[in-house]
Amino acid sequence: MPQFLDYPRYAWQVWRGDRSRGEADLDASRRADLAGLVDFSHPLTILDLANGRLRPQYAILRAQGHRVIGIDLVNRPEHSWQGRAYAVARALYADRLRLPPSAMRPDALVCGDVGHLPFPDATFDLVTSVAAFEHFLDVPAVVAEVARVLKPGGVVWAAIHVFTAPSGGHNLSFAEVPLRHVPPGVEPWDHLRQRRLPFSVPLNEWRIRDYLAVFTRHFDVLRHYCHMSEGEHLLTPEIEAELAARG
């Protein structure tokens, strides 16, 4: 499970702007990857697939003048202390990213199932998703729905936290990005090996090859690459051999 000290560390990272800079970097990577494929100079209709409670990419793209719709099961009113904490965090993200307050407004958020998108065929120029596909338990259904709602010539840009990463179990630390340490008594890649730590969020446990097999049924995969590496210092020849044997 994530360390208790992750919470104040994460709050400090949000306050200091580290997390916002990470989101800005993702936006820059998306624009660079899609150069020549998507014309960002005029307003686009964009779907932020599983936008999350903080919804930074939704806000960034809206601030750029695009028509953005976010869909996620978390897109419902919250009246708890957690909801208030997320509201504060969103305000900090907007401030650190120098976004207008209107960019974070929930007026274009849909509470819905990404496997049954409530949109007509050929609606969106671009579908973007960050750190969400690893949580989808029916990826083929989601990809098929994305293909349906994209316009002819539309593009998908997805950043996926793959299960085989050292932090792929989502159960070590959410304050270390990239992961640098594992808790005492826990082996690196525990989620692929001993599984002493339980999972606290839904995970499909897919490998890169699994995603590519499904995406290529519906799309031409123009590029896939590792956006961020982690764990090189944790990998020993013995662990590498064990992981290779496990596939």
Image: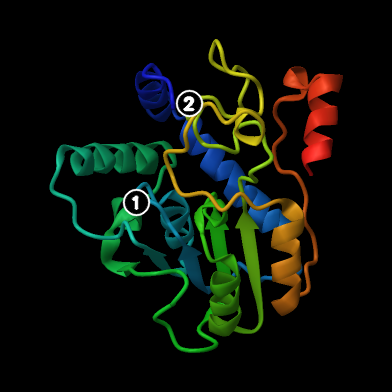
Nearer to us of marks 1 and 2 is 2
State the residue in front, 194 or 218: 194
Residue 41 visible here? yes
Residue 42 visible here? no
Residue underneath mark 1: 100
Amino acid at circle 1: Pro
N-term-proximal mark, 1 vs 2: 1
Relative side of 96 to 77, left or right:
right
Residue at image location 70% in from the left, 69% down from the top: 214
Relative side of 62 to 222, left or right:
left
- The quarter of the picture where residue 105 lies is bottom left
State the residue in front, 214 or 25: 214
Residue underneath mark 2: 175
**Placement of 84 over or under 60, stated as above or below:** above
- Callout 2: helix, strand or loop? loop
Q: Position of residue 4 (x, y in %)?
A: 36, 19
**Placement of 247 over or under 144, stated as above or below:** above
Q: Position of residue 202 (x, y in %)?
A: 46, 49
Q: Residue furthest left?
A: 79
Residue at image location 25% in from the left, 43% down from the top: 87
**Placement of 128 over or under 46, stated as above or below:** above
Amino acid at circle 2: Ala
Q: Quadrant of the N terminus?
A: top left
Q: Quadrant of the C terminus?
A: top right
User: Label 1 vs label 2: CA separation?
Assistant: 27 Å
Q: Position of residue 91 (x, y in %)?
A: 30, 41
Neighbourhood count class around disc 2 (C-alpha, 10 Å): few under 14, some 14–19, many 20 upward = some
- Callout 1: helix, strand or loop? loop
